[in-house]
Amino acid sequence: MFRDEKLKDAPAPLPIALHGEAILRQTAIEVRQFDAELTHLAEQMSASMLAAKGVGIAAPQIHSPLAMFIMASRPNDRYPDAPHMAPVVVVNPQILNASSELNAGEEGCLSVPGQRFVIQRHEKIEVRYQNLQGEWQQGELSGFIARIFQHEFDHLQGITLLERSQMPEQQPNLRKEVVQNQVSLKHTAKEGNAQ
Ligand code: NI
């Protein structure tokens, strides 16, 4: 688990990658080493997220290529109705299932500053991921927490809010043909994309 006491020694916040930077267009790389370095990266992500008043952050947003994000919903100026939750570090996430019920809601992104988009997301998703110790976790998420998960999951596929808002029929994470087409188009000029 992510331990709150570690936040006291949190490292300095890092600059957030902005839409258009190459790191935000890449498919993230699977995490294989669950070690002190990974914990340090999580702490850097947390510090950067808190400094920017985000409710979530993905590793590529602080220029790391790893498949990892943090969800940390709490009410703030931008999301006054957000539920409180203890921060969760999500490594190597998968969306196993998603409700056909969609929900439209406003989203912002630290990498697309000053802009808000109404985005359709699955109301409920069944997810699987590893924690910082490499242990697999599985569960169902709904509402705003499910929205954060889907937003951050997009980042790990090289999709920012800006691209998501422009997708035809805008959405579902499970509509892989749409997502993967867009990703592969963007990646044709790149090399060495990890799975
Ligand atoms: Ni974002």
Image (tube, rainbow, N blue to C red):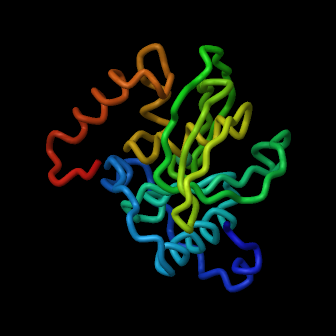
Question: Could you tell whether 8 is left or right of 38 in the image?
Answer: right
Looking at the picture, how far across and down is residue 173, in whole percent?
A: 48, 28
* Picture quadrant where residue 152 is located: top right
Residue occupying the point 65% across, 80% down? 10
Give the quarter of the figure containing the N terminus. bottom right
Q: Quadrant of residue 8?
A: bottom right
Q: Residue furthest bottom?
A: 9
Which of the pair 65/164 is nearer the observer? 65
Residue at 17% x, 49% y: name it.
Answer: 190
Which is nearer the eye, 109 or 39? 39
Left or right? Give the position of 118 relative to 155: right
- Name the spot of residue 165 as percent of width and height, x first: 49, 27
Compared with residue 107, is residue 193 higher up or lower down, i.e. above or below?
A: below
The residue that appears at 71% across and 59% down in the rendered structure is 87
Which residue is nearer to you in this view: 11 or 77? 11
Residue at 56 percent across and 40 percent down: it is 151
Residue 79's spot in the image, x, y percent?
78, 43
Tell whether 105 sits left or right of 65: right
Decide: is 176 above or below 73: above
Total labels: the figure holds: 0
